[in-house]
Amino acid sequence: MTGPLSKNPVFCALDTTSVTQAVTLAQSLIGKVGGLKVGMEFFYANGPTGYQAVAETGIPIFLDLKLHDIPNTVAGGIRAITPLKPAILTIHTAGGIDMMKAAKQASMEAAGPSPLVVGVTVLTSLDESDLKMAGVGDTAADQVRRLAGNAQEAGLDGVVCSPLEVDLLRADCGPDFKLIVPGIRPSGAAIGDQKRVMGPAEALAKGADVLVIGRPITQANHPANAADAIQAEIAASTS
Ligand code: C5P
């Protein structure tokens, strides 16, 4: 793994609007996870100040704002957030090649290391009938592959994808394209509302670079222990 990402592939999703809760959890996860995912829920509620309170833990942050607008506006949005020094940020690949190029270009203007810019392809909440209603006749898998190809052509660093797409995209996009993968469930964890899940070791073996894991850590009685157990599960599979 290169750039701002550490050897620990687990990014814990802080799905809360509470700064106190997020900071307490983040502090308990120092040295236990490779990063934290901060989404629009937290960022819209607390802005850069809330973000910085979490970032002060020193844990790399995946700022998942899924930007989607015309190229000039997305580039401006990225220039506004790069001073926060996220390790990873997201944009929608549906914004088109020019928008993705403008986003990547803007991310590289920041002083210091640039964030990885990764694309969201087909939201996993959409099925084929939703795609049809939006005028997409292809299967979801074909549309994911097409959008990931566009992202790669535009120079993005990778895409967010479901565990079931890792195989296909790793083969399509080669070894350096980052695959950021939610929908991960360590052994014994509740599946919750996720429909297509995979264990952390299996997702890594298939070629995932970052595992986004929320509730199995955040809702555990001891989040730090849950994060340690995930590392142990990964280590056991490779030893
Ligand atoms: O709690 P859980 O592990 O299911 O959380 C996964 C995180 O990844 C949440 O923040 C969720 O919004 C996000 N995510 C996802 N599936 C996607 C895209 C993002 O679960 N396709």
Image (tube, grey):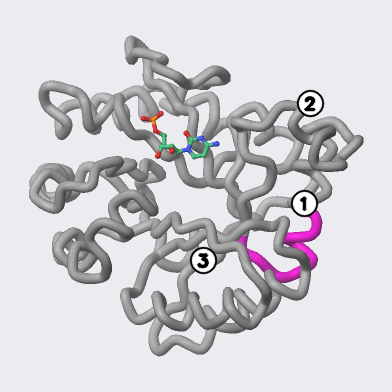
* Residue under the image location 52 percent in, 79 percent down: 107
Among the two numbered marks 2 and 1 on one chain, the one whose residue lies closer to the N terminus: 2
Residue pointed to by mark 3 = 116
- Residue 23 locus on image (x, y percent): 12, 51
Residue range in magenta is 149-157
Q: Check residue 147 in the rendering and tell me which mark sits there, or answer none.
A: 1
Which is nearer the eye, 65 or 188?
A: 65
Looking at the image, the residue that sits furthest to the front is 133
| Residue 88 located within the stretch drawn in magenta | no
Gap between marks 2 and 3, in whole Å? 32 Å
Instruction: Identify whether 7 is placed above or below 56.
Output: above
Given contact means CB atoms under 8 Å apart, are the residues at marks 3 and 1 in contact?
no
**In the displayed structure image, the side of residue 72 where residue 189 appears, left or right:** left
| Mark 1 residue type | Leu
Up the image or down, 213 lies above or below 189; here it is below
User: Residue 100 location, x and y as percent?
Assistant: 68, 70
Q: How far across and how far down the image is residue 37, in percent?
A: 35, 49
Q: Which numbered disc covers residue 129? A: 2
**Please, is residue 125 above or below residue 42 in the view?**
above
- Write the residue at 75% across / 69% down: 154
Name the residue type under label 2.
Ser
Q: Residue 16 placed where, x, y %?
A: 24, 42
Nearer the viewer's eye, disc 3 or disc 1? 1
Q: Is residue 22 left or right of residue 213?
A: left
Q: Secondary structure at mark 1?
A: helix
Q: Quadrant of residue 153?
A: bottom right
Dividing the image into four quarters, tell me where ligand 1 lies: top left
SS for dot 3: strand
